[in-house]
Image (cartoon, helix red, strand yellow):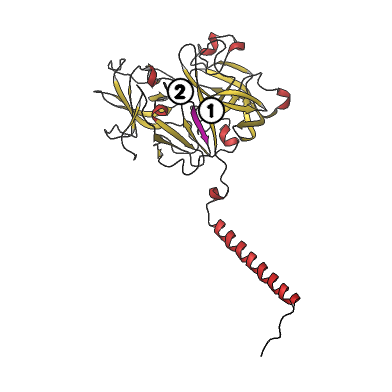
Amino acid sequence: MTRPPLTDGKQKGLTLVRQTILIAATCLATCAQLSTLPARAQTRPATVEVPIHEVDLSDGTRRYAIAIGVNGHTIDAGLDTGSVGLRVLPGVTDPAVTQEVGPVQRYGYAVGTTLEGPVVRSDVSVGTLHSSARWQAIRSIGCSAARPHCPVTHVDRHEFGILGNGLAGQGFRAILGIGLATANLPNPFQEIGAHRWIIELPRPGEMSDGRLILNPSDRQVLGFTPLPLADTHRTRSNDAVLSCLQREGGEPMCATTLIDSGAPGIELVNHDADGGWSEGAVARLTFGGAAAPEAMGVRFDIGRRAQASRFNVVSDPRVKGARIRSGLLTYFAYDVLYDADNGTISVKARSSYQDGVSAIGGTKLH
């Protein structure tokens, strides 16, 4: 049977129905594709990059800082991968505009300095990344019982600066502890929405600043190798990795090791060292549980300022067993990636620099 011709009104109506069906089908297909993507891909936060600049104390110690915002006030905060939590000295913000959200805490550092004060909440920013975040408002400073002559005792309290080695008017008004260990205060980067970050410290003799990359892209994290952690639990007390310290011609000393941007030299803790660790001796720090010749690590010369390789043997009653504090060595040889979601620390070799340390060994760790 031959259908009668459609009127103009009916023709337009049918066209509209067909268009509606096509749009709905397209939306359904798009939604189906999105649902198959990983959650991170759907909600990936923007990458934020800020400079890391070197600050040299009058005694020659290298420190590193980034600019942060606390309640609208911009300050330089000491960048410390060996601690956890943002802690701020008095005078940076108005206490009247901060909200106390936690009790008074006492937090100590390896040098013996202790900081006390309540947990507060306010807006905190790093570059364009910002959110309401918890931090410690420091009310008093002191020394631990194990280190009664810590840097605090060498300076008037009003002239004390964090990471200032007890030198009057030096150091910072805040410390940004960005380790992944469990602490009484959360990691500040996680508080403001960072899931992972890359530390690229400026190195001696290089004119440019370093870089902090918050929420790096998948492309930016390619080529990083995870380090073997001494404790793989998410509730670990520190970010120690497994490594071995060995001078040329000597026996290796393997122990849990801290890589710490706030510690300028190398310390062998609670372990004797032979007389071969003199200035100029060639040594290496290798990652993993054994000092295999092909192991990934860092080659350095003892006592070289350009390598931050001053060597000390110390006793610390707060530490159980032997430990290595490797300081800046790893950061001079590698970019370091901290992944808070997975609780991992990874490294990627940097190019060599004049009179500096060098990355050595293979690309895989077991």
Residue drawn at point x = 61 percent, y = 66 percent: 25
Disc 1 marks which amino acid? Gly
x, y (%) of residue 300? 33, 23
Q: Helix, strand, or loop for circle 2? A: loop
Let me know if residue 210 is in the magenta part: yes
Q: Helix, strand, or loop for circle 1? A: strand
Q: Around disc 1, counting alpha carbons within 10 Å, would you say few (fewer than 14), some (14 to 19), or many (20 or more)?
A: many
- Residue at label 1? 177
On residue 207, the disc is: 2
Disc 2 marks which amino acid? Met
On residue 313, the disc is: none
Q: Nearer the viewer, residue 318 or 66?
A: 66
x, y (%) of residue 195? 54, 40
Let me know if residue 199 is in the magenta part: no
In this picture, which residue range is highlighted in magenta? 209-214
Can residue 186 be seen in this snapshot? no
Closer to viewer: mark 1 or mark 2: 2
Query: Which one is earlier in the sequence, the residue at label 1 or at label 2?
Result: 1
Q: Around disc 2, counting alpha carbons within 10 Å, would you say few (fewer than 14), some (14 to 19), or many (20 or more)?
A: few
Quadrant housing the C terminus: top left
Residue furthest to the bottom: 1
Q: Is residue 50 left or right of residue 297?
A: right
Q: Nearer the viewer, residue 21 or 320?
A: 21
Is the residue 100 above or below the residue 311 in the image? below
Can residue 158 be seen in this snapshot? yes
| Disc 1 to disc 2, C-alpha distance | 26 Å
**Quadrant position of residue 240:** top left
x, y (%) of residue 337? 46, 36
